[in-house]
Amino acid sequence: MSWSFPVGHLFGSELRVHATFFLLLAWIGIAGWAEGGAAGAAVSLLYILILFACVVAHEFGHALTARRFGIRTPDVTLLPIGGLARLERMPEKPREEILVALAGPAVNVVIFLALFTLLGRGAFEALDPTTLTLAQLPAQVATLNLVLAAFNLLPAFPMDGGRVLRAVLAIFMDRPAATRAAAAAGQGLAFAMGLAGLVTGNPMLLLIAFFVFLAAGAERADEAMKTLARGLMARDAMITEFERLAPDDSLETAATTLIRTTQHEFPVVDRATGRPVGLLTRAALYRALETGPRARPVSVAMDATFPVAALTEGLASVLAKLEPGAAAVGVLGPGGALVGYVTRENIGELMVVTNARPRGRARG
Ligand SMILES: [Zn+2]
């Protein structure tokens, strides 16, 4: 479940809004109402909408710069704590990675400078940061863009500055070590922000600290998986002992196969050629059993978009095929017949097994 839904398209990327974003809007609206009635709520909401327009501009700074290096951005999602541009892949060259990372904060700096030039220094000297009025809105938006740029330039994952730090560190050490250092900086920063949130009683700061901590950890896990994937191929990670179904097998047959095995997904294979035609997941099977007779064929419930890979295809490429939410990637033998499949879970198992070392402590 993704909890975010599309609201439109911009420069070829889908713009999505996370459901919790509306909680933030409601919270800001209610707080504004409590302080200044309907007018207060209106100004608060206007402020937050302009702020998020600046966040969107920041994300498209990344997306449009990435496009210059031939990298697409399928979607940009708005979260209560900011935006997220999901790039198809990260640029591998340090120079490109640094430029893509800096383009986001650069947009906020440009917005600040434009507003500063327009409003003049006086508007900022008279600024009262504790109240929000329509007259002061432009200067407040300008200041906020400066804060956004500064926050995102903090040299720690998952901030943009963390990517710059990683790219610079990667000149002196290997990339996984550089990633670990930038992730450790992110988790340290999250602790400091969490502590500040507790001391000052600021729930928003606590929430941001929590997200920063999680994201920094995820970045490290992601890099660990990519590092492992480097020297390996699809055949090193694939499941080779499994039950397969035929498209004309009944849902009843699929259900009994689910019970007698530990599999959660079943490749559907053409009986004559052995070629894969789809994948039946446990969730899809449950849904089908709830909505109609069990005599129907497996083909009505299977997902026909079952991505496949060759035996000698790199594991990094298999991971990329799993990324858009596929449950498994089928592995084809030389003749095109299915010989195995790879799931995220069994890549995880491979990772643990590959990295496991005796602890150096005698057992007895
Ligand atoms: Zn950014």
Image (cartoon, rainbow, N blue to C red):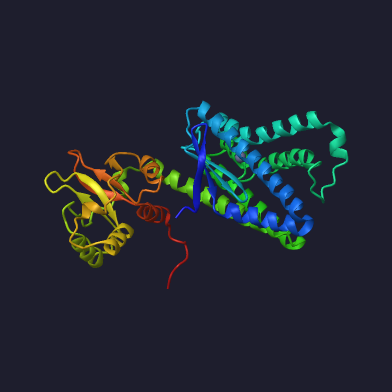
- Left or right of residue 298, residue 168 in this image: right
**x and y, in percent, of residue 351 in the image:** 40, 52
Look at 62% across and 44% down and name the residue there.
Answer: 159
Looking at the picture, tell me which residue is in the foreground, 226 or 258: 258
Outermost residue toward the left in this view: 272
In the picture shown, does residue 108 fall above or below 41? above
How many numbered badges does the structure rendering display? 0
Residue at horizontal 21 percent and vertical 57 percent from the top: 243
Residue shown at 64% from the left, 43% from the top = 52
Q: In this view, does 67 lie above or below 134?
A: above
- Left/right of residue 212 with respect to residue 239 in the rendered view: right
- Say if residue 272 shows up in the picture: yes
Residue 144 locus on image (x, y percent): 73, 42
Q: In the figure, 276 relative to 363: above or below? A: above
- Please name the residue shown 88% across and 35% down the image: 122
Q: Quadrant of the C terminus?
A: bottom left
Q: What x and y, as percent, mark residue 254?
A: 22, 60
- Tell me the quarter of the picture where residue 100 sits: top right
Q: In which quarter of the image is ligand 1?
A: top right
Left-right relation of 327 to 60: left
Locate residue 357: give its quadrant. bottom left
Depth check, front residue: 3 or 145: 3
Residue 205 visible within the image: no
Comparing 210 with 346, the one in front is 210
The extreme front residue here reads 38
Direction top: furthest residue? 68
Q: Quadrant of the N terminus?
A: bottom left
344 vs 239, left or right, is right
Image x and y of residue 137, in percent: 77, 42
Q: Check the image and name the residue furthest to the bottom.
A: 364
